[in-house]
Image (cartoon, rainbow, N blue to C red):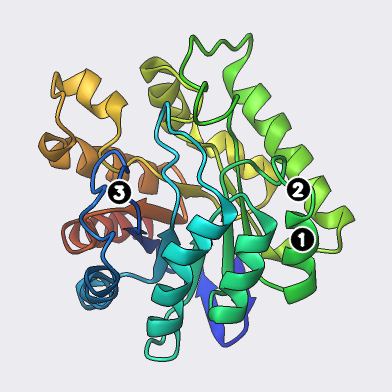
Amino acid sequence: MKLKFHNFEFNFLKKTYIMGIINVTPDSFFDGGKYFNFQKAVDHAFRLIDEGADILDIGGESTRPGAEPVSIDEELRRVIPVIEAISKRISIPISIDTYKARVAEEAIKAGATIINDISGLRFDPQMSTIASKYKVPVIVMHIKGTPKDMQKNPYYEALIPEIIEYLRDSVVIAKQAGVDENMIIIDPGIGFGKLPEHNLTIIKNLREFSNLGKPLLIGVSRKSFIGKVLNESLPEKRLEGTASAVAISVINGANIVRVHDVGFMAKVVKMADAIKFS
């Protein structure tokens, strides 16, 4: 399985790729405020590349549980200068983490080459059109509800089948808009409308998502389900738990892992890949 776009090629039969997180926000659950300053965000981008990132994922709106929406203008004000500053100076792709079509389009014009939509193309009906227009890969994620209300007693009758059906429908939405089916990546949405036990079940049964025939991205980094298992309320105390979840996700079929701690997780992924591809 390969992903080819612009001047990039990912061969998922040879390695697992690392997506480094850059939150240009004041309120993200782990690093909110750390990289809200323009220069700090730019410096962090180059640091992540040095540590081994294969993709940079830049977002200007926190989607942590309970988060309030940010206006389009404010989101643009946060992310566009950062993307413009780094896009011509790096040799890896930039992903724009947004569910707003206008933000995605402006980010692409500024140099982004991947769309990462937490809503699976549901929150903004124009998003699939933008992905098709600019011929960029699109990551479609499963979410139950919205960031503001998604953790209020999420319930599933059949967890894995329901998530697969949602993602299958997102793939259909993308294809109907003209997106090349080889440019679609799926994400089961760890922590987005899931209880801790749901997240553990998803990771344990990750191989079931291979039935969709798409590259699989997973984001477990420092999330609250890890804190629940380890009895660690602070995200800063969840590095080892993240490493375990990342390694198991890789073995169970993840093709891309979205992480905060790129240097540390690059070693975890390299070891997991050595086992996975042996």
Point out residue 245 in the picture as x, y percentages from the top left corner.
29, 38
- Amino acid carrying mark 3 in the image: Pro
Q: CA distance from mark 1 to mark 2?
A: 8 Å
Q: Secondary structure at mark 2?
A: helix
Foreground residue among 166 and 47: 47
Say if mark 3 contacts mark 2, CB within 8 Å. Answer: no
- Amino acid carrying mark 2 in the image: Val
Q: Which residue does the numbered mark 1 point to in the structure image? A: 181
Left or right? Give the position of 145 relative to 64.
right
Instruction: Please report the residue visible at 66 percent of the width from the left and 71 percent of the height from the top.
Output: 136
Label 3 and label 2: CA atoms lie apart by 32 Å
Indicate the secondary structure of the residue bearing disc 1. Answer: helix
- Residue 92 % position (x, y): 42, 80
| Mark 1 vs 2: CB contact within 8 A | yes
Residue 207 location in percent, x, y? Answer: 52, 38
Q: Is residue 264 above or below residue 205?
A: below
Nearer the viewer's eye, disc 3 or disc 2?
A: 3
- Residue farthest toward the bottom in the current orientation of the protein: 89
Residue drawn at (38%, 82%) of the image: 86
* Quadrant location, the C terminus: bottom left
Answer above or below: position of 268 versus 155. Answer: below
As drawn, 174 above or below 202: below
Mark positioned earlier in the residue sequence (3 or 2):
3
Disc on res. 171: 2
What residue is rendered at 50% in x and 31% in y?
147
Which residue is disc 3 drawn over? 26
